[in-house]
Amino acid sequence: MERYDLLIKKALLPNGKVKDIAVKSGRFVKIGSDIEAEAGYVINASGKIALPSFANMHTHVPMSLLRGIGADLPLMDWLQKVIWPLEGEFVSPEFVKAGTELGLLEMIKSGTTLFMDMYFYEEEVGKVAKEAGIRAGLGFGILDFPTKVAKTPEEYLKRAREFAESFKGEELVFPVICPHAPYTCSPQTLKKAKELADELGLYLHIHVAETKDEVERIREEYGNTPIRYLSSIDFLSDRVLCAHMVWLDEEEMEIVKERDVKVAHCPESNLKLASGIAPVPEYIRKGIHVCLGTDGSASNDNLDMLEELSTMAKLHKGVSLDAKAIDAVTALKVATQNGFSAVGIRAGRIEEGYEADMILIDPENPHLQPLYDPVAQVVYSAQSSDIDTVICRGKVLMEKRELKTLDEERILYEAKIWGEKIRNFLDRYKG
Ligand SMILES: CSC[C@H]1O[C@@H](n2cnc3c(O)ncnc32)[C@H](O)[C@@H]1O
Ligand SMILES: [Zn+2]
């Protein structure tokens, strides 16, 4: 008799069919009716909706400890007056570890199995991600100005290289090169970051065209808009993930399409920081590769991809007056498959041959009943607390809402202690 690592029985698939799902060596190997086999682990998914898990394609996970701080400010005031001074005071390996644990708790509980992160002391993020069993594309943030983690661009680049070299060849965690933005990195730094990514065969991840102010600043400094400027220094390729991309003109969209640059749309952060609304339906129409991210928890203020995808789908209908601007099936694809495939991972579909990353949603809640159209109802009315089970590469990270790899009680306790320290500092700073 065939033996599988994991057998998920009687799950309701997005196509409306009830099937068993067999997993071996981290992949979906058989999807069929009443699979009779031995299995290392069996999950009874009767009555549950099976969907691909989410790929959060732009985060600063340790910022979970700064959630709720700096509300109601635009990006540059938020960064310069609140966030960067706080990071200068608190960022340390211990802060990053505790913030990552809190963030991963939230991400796993809301169905994410891949996140793309940019921050400081990223080796701490890597260690926690490995323990948690989640996929992560991680990069040490590169800047031109001095902070407590590095003084010169050369030092940031050195740290980025050291981090990348120490995390190469891992199963689920992979290094990425992360210059922060065109307005915080000189052309020399951006070119060196690209050379480093090319030398090590890694993706680049960067903030681009987030605000109108940024566009003006880049135009004044370099005589061009951000995408034209990045194109002129040969920074763009199919291995570049650009977060935000709110303010592009038609010609820039053509450049992005032509180079197959990946776009991480972050609608909630863009709304909260009053940055604007990226023309995502137009990107999709043009065939640009769009995926979805939350950004950090101090600009969102959570890491909940289910909420993010619902916001995305509704927001673009509202601004375009087109109910089909981003339909439910497309929204789900942007939040799942498009994220994984942007970084070369064959996941985001529950199909034989795909990586076994998936969630089970419990529809036995008033806001999901009666159930007529599982995909649309998940997109428009599910809450992350409906997510019952989360599986990453065939490993169960949460079942019946119980976390299997993280100690929820300890992590929440430690986050509250950090909260006390940061609150005391803020009180003194205000006073
Ligand atoms: C160099 S590490 C990452 C750096 O980015 C800051 N950050 C967080 N959110 C945003 C955003 O939306 N735009 C630009 N920069 C952002 C974070 O605080 C870190 O300093
Ligand atoms: Zn960001």
Image: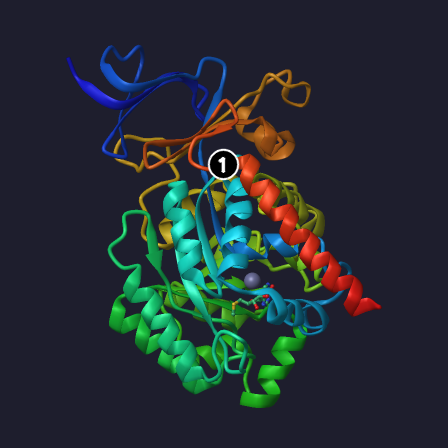
**Quadrant hosting residue 350:** top left
Residue 410 vs 266, above or below: the answer is above
Q: Is residue 234 visible?
A: no
Q: Nearer the viewer, residue 179 or 40?
A: 40
- Colour pattern of the rendering: rainbow
| Left or right of residue 421: residue 48 | left
Which quarter of the rendering shows the C terminus?
A: bottom right
Tag 1: residue type? Answer: Asp
Check disc 1 and report the residue beneath it: 407
Question: Which residue reaches farthest left?
Answer: 1
Residue 283 vs 180, above or below: the answer is above
**Quadrant hosting residue 262:** bottom left
Residue 167, horizontal then vertical, whole percent:
31, 59
Residue 59, horizontal then vertical, whole percent:
52, 56
**Quadrant hosting residue 304:** top right
SS for dot 1:
loop
Q: Is residue 401 visible?
A: yes
